[in-house]
Image (cartoon, rainbow, N blue to C red):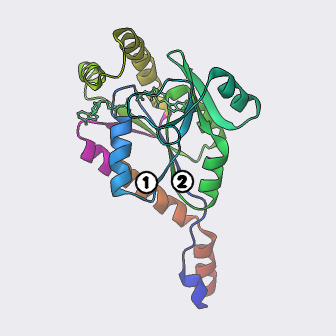
Amino acid sequence: MTSNTNTLERERGILIVLSGPSGVGKGTVCAALRKISPDIVYSVSATTRSPRQGEVDGVNYFFKTREQFQQLIDTDEVLEWAEYVDNFYGTPRRFVEETLRSGKDVILEIEVQGALQVKQKFSEGVFIFLLPPSLDELENRIVTRGTETDEVIRSRMSVAIDEIRLMEHYDYAIVNDHVETACAKIQAILAAEHCKKERMYPKIVQWMDEVN
Ligand SMILES: Nc1nc2c(ncn2[C@@H]2O[C@H](COP(=O)(O)OP(=O)(O)O)[C@@H](O)[C@H]2O)c(=O)[nH]1
Ligand SMILES: Nc1ncnc2c1ncn2[C@@H]1O[C@H](COP(=O)(O)OP(=O)(O)O)[C@@H](O)[C@H]1O
């Protein structure tokens, strides 16, 4: 056996899609995951929503006008896009494709319509739905966050019910009761998905050929 066959080379990274109703804790869980799994790359979305206090262009989102967003769609620069409670949101295509090609895992934090579009293009992606412990707790979290008006909160709660109905299209559901537990579950899923992928590496087939 030659020595270079001892190295398992990573192929494409894994695409993780995390969805869940507004206020369930997607942003909080992603921020915690970033600290404990710094190798996962986060895709920054484009949106027509106005920045919240403290949000930075290019870090939280790429903030766009409607015209600019429409141009991204027209020039096929978004992998998926959706209208959510009167604003547009979309995933920049090139960054995701290049990062996956470089062997790194990428996480998209996106709503359900967009996730279903991604599923058609990347059926091998890992689709995770984050659930609240209860609907009351969901409302409590979105109200406590204090970033939306009462009217927007009502719209988001009504969309939440429709989104939860579509969770059957996801591979995994995780209840975000505690942030640390939710992160540990995502890490476990990702580790298991890497094991599945590694089983398929041609290098391993090559080892077996050499052994026989
Ligand atoms: N389809 C799609 N949804 C996105 C994208 N980026 C963010 N979203 C989703 O849009 C919804 C609203 O996001 P936002 O206004 O930041 O509110 P928050 O998730 O409650 O903090 C959430 O469900 C996000 O996950 C994207 O690129 N594409
Ligand atoms: N496991 C949790 N337990 C209690 N509060 C949480 C938990 N996860 C998130 N939160 C709180 O809920 C609110 C909404 O979280 P956020 O991450 O902004 O949600 P999303 O990104 O899904 O809209 C925030 O105030 C956050 O601190």
SS for tag 2? loop
**x 34%, y 10%: residue:** 150
Mark yes or no: residue 185 visible: no
| Disc 2 and disc 1 in contact, CB within 8 angstroms | yes
For residue 173, side relative to residue 200 (left or right): left
- Toward the viewer: 1 or 163? 163
Q: Is residue 184 above or below residue 46?
A: below
For residue 158, side relative to residue 96 (left or right): left
Q: Position of residue 182 (x, y in %)?
A: 30, 44
SS for tag 1? helix
Residue range of the region highlighted in magenta in the rendering: 170-185
Q: Position of residue 89 (x, y in %)?
A: 56, 28
- Quadrant location of the N terminus in the rendered image: bottom right
Q: Position of residue 159 (x, y in %)?
A: 44, 16
- Quadrant location of the C terminus in the rendered image: bottom right
Tell which residue pokes out farthest to the top in this image.
151
Residue, disc 2: 14
For residue 84, side relative to residue 72 (left or right): left
Q: Is residue 159 magenta?
A: no
Sequence-wise first label, 2 or 1? 2
Residue, disc 1: 190
**x 42%, y 12%: residue:** 155
Residue 148 has which mark? none
